[in-house]
Image (cartoon, helix red, strand yellow):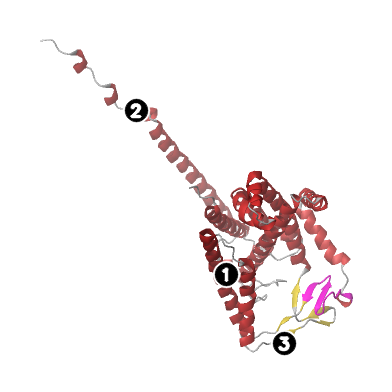
């Protein structure tokens, strides 16, 4: 009986492949080895740092946050004094950074959008002016712009005794912009609640108007109605609350004004520099996004009889947003990080307050780590929000 030679031979596929020849196993092994090396290196650096700090009798940890700060902060969104803790001082610096970043981002987007649209205007003067603006503010480093505006407010503007008074109750001097504000009244809290309710109502109103337009093709004056709701509901709340009209008006006493609301030159210089610098880049982002939309879309919309404003809002911008949003996110992050330059002109942002804390406590590692954590958190939150908005605004193919 003759045996089949094929039956005696082992199947090549049944042979075990050595792990060093298996790409999948090798990749897992290399990743584990890399993770171990990085972990050991981090452990060595951390233990070595802690040992050296202990030898030099330098305190570690975040216990210093509960100690008395013993330094004043010129601007604060919450109550603060030198008797408060370092932790509260850092919260004040964080809120200052948050305020200037949020206000700067909103105004930069609005200004940059206007300039970007103006850059594409058929009017020669408007287009050239927008181009000159972009070239000027893009080519000058933001730090130099901050120095310029800081020097402008302190050296060009007059002293409080000769303050400019363009509007009754408003005074502009080298000590900042001072203006009157309403006297504290319980109705103001309810007006703020009414404003939030109005914003929520506007959101649902615009959703209904958009759905109605898609269903029937009829336009709803959403902008005018939204503006009326935004102003009318808080105003109605104010009227129902007795319509208080008492004002806290600034009065010159000694060398400065007392009362009212004061916007410091440092805050104004920082905000103005960041806005003008970032808006130039936002304008280029908007211009590129608009130009990415085919001209046929504009011609088709105009052939249907749409007005230029409706062409821009209903046809061009919705398609341009998918190109605008990703680079716009980068500009928002840049503005937030550039706000750390406030320390150069004396505005008490988080970096400035943390720097003072480091100088007084000597805990540089913890202070720098807190700076990194704060800016990392702000950047991640901004990116997460913009990524969500980008997914919401992307074109849905049918």
Q: CA distance from mark 1 to mark 3?
A: 30 Å
Name the residue that disc number 3 marks: 246
Q: Position of residue 6 (x, y in %)?
A: 21, 15
The answer to whether 8 is drawn above or below residue 373 in the figure is above
Q: Position of residue 149 (x, y in %)?
A: 81, 61
Question: Do the residues under discs 1 and 3 have CB atoms within 8 angstroms?
Answer: no
Observer-side mark, 2 or 1, equals 1
Q: Is residue 177 magenta?
A: yes
Name the residue that disc number 2 marks: 18
Q: CA distance from mark 2 to mark 1?
A: 65 Å
Give the SS element for disc 1. Answer: helix
The answer to whether 218 is drawn above or below residue 164 in the figure is above
Q: Which mark is residue 202?
A: 1
Residues in magenta?
A: 162-178
Q: CA distance from mark 3 to mark 2?
A: 86 Å
The answer to whether 186 is drawn above or below residue 21 in the figure is below
The earlier-in-sequence mark between 2 and 1 is 2
The earlier-in-sequence mark between 3 and 2 is 2
């Amino acid at each position: 009986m003759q045996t089949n030679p094929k039956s005696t031979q082992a199947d090549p596929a049944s042979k075990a492949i050595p792990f060093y020849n298996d790409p999948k196993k090798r990749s897992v092994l290399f990743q584990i080895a890399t993770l171990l090396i990085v972990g050991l290196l981090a452990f060595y650096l951390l233990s070595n740092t802690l040992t050296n700090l202990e030898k030099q009798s330098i305190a570690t940890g975040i216990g210093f946050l509960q100690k008395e700060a013993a330094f004043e902060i010129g601007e604060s969104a919450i109550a603060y004094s030198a008797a408060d803790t370092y932790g509260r001082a850092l919260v004040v610096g964080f809120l200052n950074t948050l305020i200037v970043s949020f206000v700067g981002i909103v105004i930069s987007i609005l200004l940059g959008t206007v300039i970007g649209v103006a850059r594409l205007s058929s009017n020669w003067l408007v287009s050239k002016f927008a181009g000159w603006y972009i070239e000027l503010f893009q080519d000058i480093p933001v730090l130099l712009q901050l120095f310029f505006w800081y020097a402008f407010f302190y050296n060009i503007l007059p002293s409080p005794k000769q303050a400019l008074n363009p509007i009754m109750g408003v005074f502009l001097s080298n000590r900042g912009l001072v203006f009157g504000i309403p006297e504290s009244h319980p109705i103001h809290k309810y007006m703020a609640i009414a404003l939030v309710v109005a914003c929520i109502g506007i959101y649902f109103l615009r959703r209904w108007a958009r759905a109605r337009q898609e269903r029937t093709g009829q336009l709803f004056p959403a902008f005018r109605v939204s503006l009326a709701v935004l102003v009318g509901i808080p105003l109605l709340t104010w009227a129902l609350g007795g319509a208080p009209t008492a004002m806290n008006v600034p009065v010159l006493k000694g060398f400065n004004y007392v009362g009212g609301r004061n916007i410091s030159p440092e805050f104004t210089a920082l905000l103005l520099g960041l806005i003008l610098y970032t808006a130039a880049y936002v304008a280029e982002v908007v211009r590129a996004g608009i130009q990415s939309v085919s001209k046929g879309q504009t011609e088709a919309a105009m052939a249907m009889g749409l007005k230029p404003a409706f062409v821009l809002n209903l046809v061009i911008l919705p398609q341009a947003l998918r190109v605008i949003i990703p680079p716009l996110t980068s500009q928002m992050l840049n503005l937030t990080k550039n706000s750390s330059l406030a320390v150069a002109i004396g505005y008490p942002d988080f970096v400035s307050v943390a720097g003072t804390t480091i100088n007084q406590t000597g805990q540089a590692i913890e202070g720098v780590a807190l700076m990194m954590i704060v800016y990392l958190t702000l950047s991640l939150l901004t990116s997460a929000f913009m990524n969500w908005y980008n997914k919401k605004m992307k074109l849905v193919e049918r």
